[in-house]
Amino acid sequence: MDALTEAIVRLLRRQEETEQRLVRMEAALRAAGMLGESSPPVVEPPEAAPVEPAPPEPQGAEPAPVEAFVAQPQPEATEAPRELETEFGLTWVSRAGAVTLLFCAAFLFKYAIDKQWIGPGARVVLGVLAGVAVLGWGERLWRGRQAVYGQAVSGLGIAVLYVSLYASFGLYHLLPAGVVFVMMAAVTAVAIWLALRYGTAAMGALGLLGGYLTPGLLSTGENRAALLFAYVLVLDAGALWLARTRNWLKFEAFAVVATVVIWWAWFTSYFTPEQHTVATVFVVQFYALFLLGRKPSTWIAAQLLAVAGLAFTWPANPGPYLVVAIAVTLAGLIWADSKESSGLAQAAGFAFWIVYGAWYIGLKVDPIPVGQMFGLLTLAFLCLFLWTPWQVVVGKRSCNKADLLLASANAVAYYTACYTLLSPGYHGRLGLFTAATACLYFGLGELLRRRLGEDERGVVPRLLANGTGAALLTLAIPVQFAGYGVTISWAAEGAALSWIGRRTGTARVSFLALAVLGLSFLRLWSVDMWKVLPEGHLLVANSRFVICLATTAALWASARWIGRGRAALIPYLAGHSVLFGGLVFEISDWAARFAEGTSGNVESAGISVLMAVYAMALIVVGVVTGTRLNRILGLLLIGAVIGKLYLADVWALSLAYRIVAFGVGGVLLMGTSYVYSRHREKVQALWREQPE
């Protein structure tokens, strides 16, 4: 009433100000001669203040604009403090009062029980009557235009009824559980009906809370799973219906959380292996129901929880678990396609593989049905793999980040799962399996190229698919081969990718080639170089040096195909390091086999001579081919030779080997200087022309 009074007063005040402005406008227009004599006189309202006529304007002056006589509206004071005060004083204080009265009634009830004033039956009857009376009072207040206050009172009545009915069974055992269950379900229905009638979500939440608590409060210890889940399913349907019809979307999350809590409580207390079927049926039903929610977060939660529930239901039965889990995953993809929700599709893929990984770790089945599980895992992989081409070909949509992430993660998860499953008994076939999976992604990349084109819209999806295929193909090499074959295969793959990048003009493929070549280079230096060769092996003509030559050739070919710039410099320098390193290892082996007792001196002197020879060869090649890089590398190596001779060899070598090292080194240094002296003008011309 106070709020209505204030509104009426403001309306009357505004009407009075408007009439006064009209009077001033009429007077101003008459004074300016803009109104004729036939104009009807202006009747002032009784409350209007007298208006003095405006002074006449001088002759020749233009009439004043009408806006000058119109009073500008003043900004009204904000009603936010008054609204906040009303909200707190009416809504929250009334709810707090209702809860306080509930506690008061409980304390009074407890006092009456302690004093033995009333017996158990009377206590329950009085509680039920009090709840009904409070509900009636709340209804009367609501009809009397005290809506918020009446809602709080009605909520108090619902709470009193729940407590009284629970006491009739849980405390005093006056009524059987079935009767009380039906009565509490009826109270829940009344609460939901009042929520719709009053238009308040709080009343609906109170009713749903009481409904979800009813099975636990009235539990008799009997395992009636079908009845329990049917009841919860009805409550969930009611919660989703309220969320959809009244836009109370928080009820969806409320229903999901309550269902998970009830299902888990039943599973940990009553689940037996004979109840696989009933548990699976209701997991699927709950999943299908929550897919009808309006919020995408509800769909995602249902997807994750359904697959997890199936894993708990079938802890040691691969066939049923995987079949139903794949069906749920496929249903999620279909629903995601109908709603154009990439988030749900992504959740379906991640949920399946993450839950499967946890389930497989805890799997205790001997023997594991490898063939059955491999076939079902492949089916799940293909369902998720086809999501991207389905979106592009059938849905006529572009790939977003979620689709690309799903495609890559699906490959990683599938390969990891199958490698773990097949490795013990089928390791010899894993390389072929890996290559076949890589071909699928190469095919996907080609499909995306044709459908999405060569522009920016299609380049990222295509490169991601091709990159996944290249990664799998790279991984297939060490899986299928062993020893030096891994290094050679990686080097050959890197060279092939460099050639493809050159032919297609795609820089990203060239960078992928560098990554594969890097794997070959690291494996060569960390594993292959240090392998012990068999006794009596030939110098230079042995497997280790052949690997070095093959890797060097692949690195230099890649540098040529990549072209100019820093990207080409990396494999070129790596090739020199591999070739030079292979020669160093050959000198070390020769010294160990043919110079017993003096192998250290022979090895050090031989390396110094090798450095000088290699440096001179680089300079000669640089002068002949006009490549500045080779000449610079040769000069740097010459500096290293000089440093080694004067800082290490002069102190470490014996006199004879010192003479050999310094003699051969000096001759080679003089020969290098002669090359520069002989071709001085050519070298200077090359520098002026800035060749690469």
Image (tube, rainbow, N blue to C red):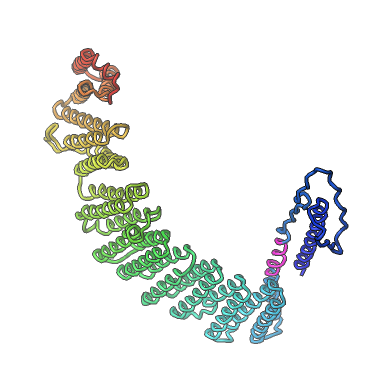
Which range is magenta?
83-95
- Tell me how many marks there are: 0
For the point 80% across and 53% down, which residue is it?
A: 29
Front in this rendered view, residue 159 or 238: 238
620 w.r.t. 49: above or below: above
- Residue at 66%, 74% in the rendered image: 151
Residue 38 in view (yes/no): yes
Q: Is residue 273 left or right of residue 219?
A: left
Q: Nearer the viewer, residue 149 or 304?
A: 149
Is residue 655 something that shows in the picture?
no
- Residue 127 coordinates in the image, percent (x, y): 66, 82
Residue 492 picture quarter = top left
| Residue 492 as seen in the image, left or right of residue 341 | left
Q: Main secondary structure of the magenta part?
A: helix
Locate residue 422, reporting x and y percent.
25, 58
Point out residue 72 in the picture as x, y percentages from the top left corner. Answer: 75, 52
> Which of the image's four quarters has the N terminus?
bottom right
Q: Give the image location of residue 261, x and y in percent.
A: 49, 69
